[in-house]
Amino acid sequence: MKETVVSGIRPTGKLHLGNYFGAVTNFVKMQYDYNCYFFIADLHSLTTHPTPDDLHGYVRHVLVEYLACGINPEESTIYIQSDVPEVAELYLYLNMNAYLGELERSTSFKDKIRSQPDNVNAGLLTYPSLMAADILLHRATKVPVGKDQEQHLEMTRTFGNRFNRLYKTDFFPEPYAFNYAQNLVKVPGLDGKGKMSKSEGDSNCIYLSDSPEIIRKKVSRAVSDSGPTSENQTKPEAIQNLFDLMKIVSSADTISHFDSLYNKMEIRYGDLKKQLAEDMIIFNTPIRERIEELSKDTSYLRQVARHGALKARESASETIREVRKLIGFKSF
């Protein structure tokens, strides 16, 4: 039997190349090797944005882009968190055995109360319980998370083990973080420093839905310098970032050509940026066209969401039935 993997996707905006080469390509590969549940975390999003302008629109956009990137609803289960009411029920049961002190010690809770002091809500405090419910609901053993979520995953194990101990069972397995890829691709931003990130602004990112015109404009404005001052010198961060982006979308011959020009002090960054932009457009075009195609097919999106909810609820209802039985709930 395949091991179960669970991963959440927040409906916070468009996907960029960093997302694609980070999480998304791993999701696409792992769906054929594991029993995968990918959920769009609209309940989670309310902890920081309780009154979103267009929550449904954000959820729809995420669904479209993940399908366009290759997540196959026949191979994996992709669903919207709020379509599975069992999530909220297990969240309630876990909260009954989650202690105030351990929730307050959560690093993310401390960070959030600093960043949003006027919105310190109960959802922020119990965020680890909700994340635990998402994972334990499908009795997952593997969770692809970054460093910032490892404490939450440790708390998930704590909550699951505490439930097992309280009710004298071994029902919930221990989930662990795992990295499907051997070497993660770090995608730099266009600002000359750090990784590609929405938090640094749209000009730092190449979005999967960007048109060729937008890509050309963004790349032309990417940070560079006045050029090398000696042969074979080490590239400064901003220039290395451009070459790293080229490694992702360009041919080996193209990279070698511009690397040679740099080492001979003959490089023209305008030419490099034009080539990089065209290679990004070639890479991006099939995904962008698929996004545009799916965005028009409301019937198919509705079908995918309903199919995903049914598959997720089949797993979730089994868990809830057993949890209710273990706790002692019985119908008269």
Image (cartoon, rainbow, N blue to C red):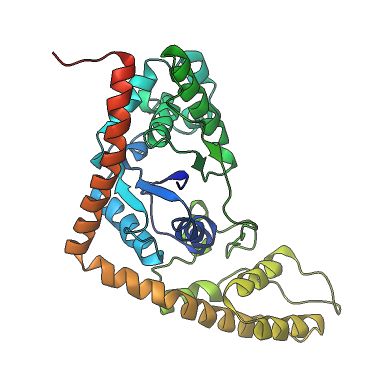
Kindly indicate the quadrant of the structure image that contains residue 123: top left
Q: Residue at x 27, y 55 (%)?
A: 60
Q: Residue at x 36, y 46 (%)?
A: 39
Q: Is residue 307 left or right of residue 231?
A: left
Provide residue 138's location: percent of width, then percent of height.
38, 37
Q: Is residue 100 left or right of residue 187?
A: left
Provide residue 25's location: percent of width, then percent of height.
50, 61
Q: Is residue 82 left or right of residue 152?
A: left
Can residue 185 be seen here? The reply is: yes
Residue closest to the far front: 1
Q: Residue at x 84, y 73 (%)?
A: 233
Q: Nearer the viewer, residue 326 or 261?
A: 326
Q: Is residue 256 above or below residue 122?
A: below
Provide residue 119's location: percent of width, then percent of height.
38, 28
Provide residue 169's location: percent of width, then percent of height.
44, 19
Q: Residue at x 36, y 37 (%)?
A: 44
Q: Is residue 58 left or right of residue 257?
A: left
Can residue 54 be seen here? The reply is: no
Q: How many marks?
A: 0
Q: Is residue 73 above or below residue 157?
A: below
Q: Is residue 277 above or below residue 177?
A: below
Looking at the rendering, in which quadrant would you find the C terminus? top left
Q: Nearer the viewer, residue 283 or 4?
A: 4
